[in-house]
C-alpha cells in the first residue's frame, strides 16, 4: 500500500511537513498484475485484480498478494489536479518515495 496525496510541489514525494501535501480520502485505487513484467499494463492486464478506496488519510493497502510485479492505477475525481503524469519505475515503494529505491 501507499498514500494518494496532493503533490503541491510536484516532486513525486509526499512532504509530511507541508500541510498542502495532504492525503486524499475516497479515491478509487485499482491493482493490476503485470504478467509480462514490462512495467506497462496492456492487453489482458487491463482488468484490475483488486480495487479499494483510500481511507480518511489517503492510505490504501492490498494484502494477500502472490509474489510478482503489480501496478497501481488511481481513478481521480473529475476535478482533481494532475501532477506529473504517468511514471513507470523500478521503485519497490517501501520507503514512501517514487525514486527507484
Image (cartoon, rainbow, N blue to C red):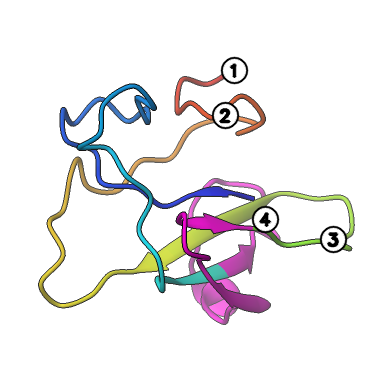
Identify the secondary structure beneath mark 4: loop
Q: Is label 2 in contact with label 1 (beta carbons under 8 Å)?
A: yes
Q: Indicate the position of residue 36 as horizontal and vertical percent values.
A: 67, 55
Q: CA distance from mark 3 to mark 4?
A: 17 Å
Q: Secondary structure at mark 3?
A: loop
Q: Nearer the viewer, residue 8 or 12?
A: 8
N-terminal-most mark, 1 or 4: 4
Q: Residues within 10 Å of mark 2 (few under 14, many from 20)?
A: few
Residue matched to label 1: 101
What residue do we see at 47% from left, 63% from top?
Answer: 56
Tag 4 residue: 36
Q: Position of residue 95 (x, y in %)?
A: 61, 24
Q: Which residues are magenta?
A: 31-60
Residue 71 relative to residue 20: left or right? right
Q: Is residue 43 above or below residue 23?
A: below
N-terminal-most mark, 2 or 1: 2
Q: Position of residue 59 (x, y in %)?
A: 54, 54
**Residue bearing the label numbered 3:** 65
- Say if mark 2 contacts mark 3, CB within 8 Å: no
Q: Residues within 10 Å of mark 4 (few under 14, many from 20)?
A: few
Q: Nearer the viewer, residue 38 or 88?
A: 88
Residue at left offset 41%, top offset 74%? 26
Q: Which mark is residue 91?
A: 2
Amino acid at each position: 500500500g501507499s498514500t494518494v496525496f496532493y503533490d503541491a510541489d510536484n516532486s513525486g514525494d509526499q512532504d509530511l511537513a507541508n500541510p498542502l501535501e495532504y492525503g486524499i480520502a475516497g479515491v478509487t485505487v485499482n491493482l493490476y498484475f503485470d504478467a509480462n513484467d514490462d512495467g506497462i499494463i496492456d492487453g489482458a492486464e487491463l482488468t484490475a485484480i483488486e480495487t479499494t478506496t483510500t481511507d480518511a488519510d489517503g492510505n490504501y493497502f492490498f494484502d494477500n498478494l502472490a509474489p510478482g510485479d503489480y501496478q497501481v492505477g488511481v481513478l481521480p475525481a473529475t476535478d482533481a489536479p494532475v501532477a506529473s503524469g504517468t511514471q513507470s519505475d523500478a521503485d519497490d515503494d517501501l520507503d514512501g518515495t517514487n525514486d527507484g529505491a
